[in-house]
Image (cartoon, rainbow, N blue to C red):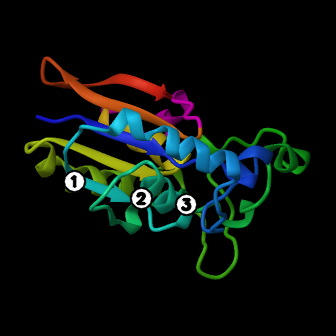
């Protein structure tokens, strides 16, 4: 049974400013590109039974700069739909909703086509991705290139936790994390690894 590697895309302007970024397809900053390139040594020499990426440019560019090949996009790897909070920081949200917490409150609907998602809805997408990769893990390692909140939910679901427990796993830009098995049970083997 292989390991499940999780790559959070490199830095963007909004990841620096703390703005919620789901469908806004921002490019990597110069530093974000350097972060993505720096991941290559962590991945060199590994063969992946399956390599999937979010369809957003920041994730696909990270995969490319990290030296991954044969990457297939999967729309389920898209970041949490932040609805009306797209582009808004937590500090700004707290001005009108001081007790708001993404992991329990979700988000209000946004522009057409972006109704926002609850933790449970993101969890269902994560479960779909995990069911897709389960078969491939029997053949070796699998790598996913995606976004912070989504990968945190996916980690919670892989460990048998509720989607909202993704709050426990802070995930930095331009990092590799590895989920493995110990005595047949999912564990975090590495988290936020950088060269």
Is 55 inside the magenta-drawn segment? Answer: no
The residue under label 1 is 50
Which labelled disc corresponds to residue 77?
A: 2
Which labelled disc corresponds to residue 168?
A: none
User: Could you tell me which secondary element the residue under label 1 belongs to?
Assistant: strand
From the top left corner, tell me how far across and down residue 138 is, in percent: 8, 42
Counting residues from the start of the chain, the first of labels 1 and 3 encountered is 1
The answer to which quarter of the image holds residue 98 is top right
Q: Residue at x 63, y 48 (%)?
A: 32
User: Could you tell me which secondary element the residue under label 2 belongs to?
Assistant: helix
From the top left corner, tell me how far across and down residue 142 is, in percent: 24, 45
Q: How would you rate the neighbour count of disc 3 (Cα within 10 Å): few for under 14, some for 14-19, many for 20 or more?
A: some
Q: Residue furthest bottom?
A: 112
Q: Residue at x 31, y 51 (%)?
A: 127
Q: Which residues are magenta?
A: 160-172
Measured along the vertical axis of the image, is residue 152 above or below residue 83?
Answer: above
Counting residues from the start of the chain, the first of labels 2 and 3 encountered is 2
Query: Real-space Cα distance between discs 2 and 3?
Result: 14 Å
The answer to which quarter of the image holds residue 63 is bottom left
With 179 as the anchor, is 64 left or right in this view?
right
With 137 as the anchor, is 111 left or right in this view?
right
Measured along the vertical axis of the image, is residue 140 above or below residue 76?
Answer: above
From the top left corner, tell me how far across and down residue 67 is, in percent: 38, 51
- Determine if residue 123 is in view: yes
Is 169 inside the magenta-drawn segment? Answer: yes
The answer to which quarter of the image holds residue 177 is top left
Q: Nearer the viewer, mark 1 or mark 3?
A: 1
The residue under label 3 is 117
Measured along the vertical axis of the image, is residue 36 above or below residue 51?
Answer: above
Q: Residue furthest right?
A: 95
User: Could you tell me which secondary element the residue under label 3 belongs to?
Assistant: loop
């Amino acid at each position: 049974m292989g390991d499940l590697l999780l790559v959070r895309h490199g830095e963007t302007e909004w990841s620096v400013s703390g703005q919620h970024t789901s469908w806004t397809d921002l490019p990597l900053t110069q530093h974000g590109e350097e972060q993505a390139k720096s991941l290559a040594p962590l991945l060199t020499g590994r063969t992946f039974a399956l390599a999937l990426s979010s369809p957003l440019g920041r994730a696909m560019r990270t995969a490319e700069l990290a030296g991954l090949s044969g990457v297939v996009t999967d729309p389920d790897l898209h970041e949490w739909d932040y609805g009306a909070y797209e582009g808004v920081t937590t500090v700004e949200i707290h001005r009108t909703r001081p007790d708001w917490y993404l992991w329990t409150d979700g988000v209000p609907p946004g522009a057409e086509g972006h109704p926002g998602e609850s933790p449970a809805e993101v969890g269902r997408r994560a479960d779909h991705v995990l069911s897709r990769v389960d078969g491939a893990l029997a053949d070796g390692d699998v790598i996913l290139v995606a976004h912070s909140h989504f990968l945190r939910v996916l980690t919670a679901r892989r460990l048998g936790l509720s989607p909202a427990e993704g709050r426990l796993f802070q995930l930095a830009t331009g990092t590799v994390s590895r989920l493995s098995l110990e005595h047949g049970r999912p564990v975090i083997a590495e988290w936020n690894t950088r060269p």
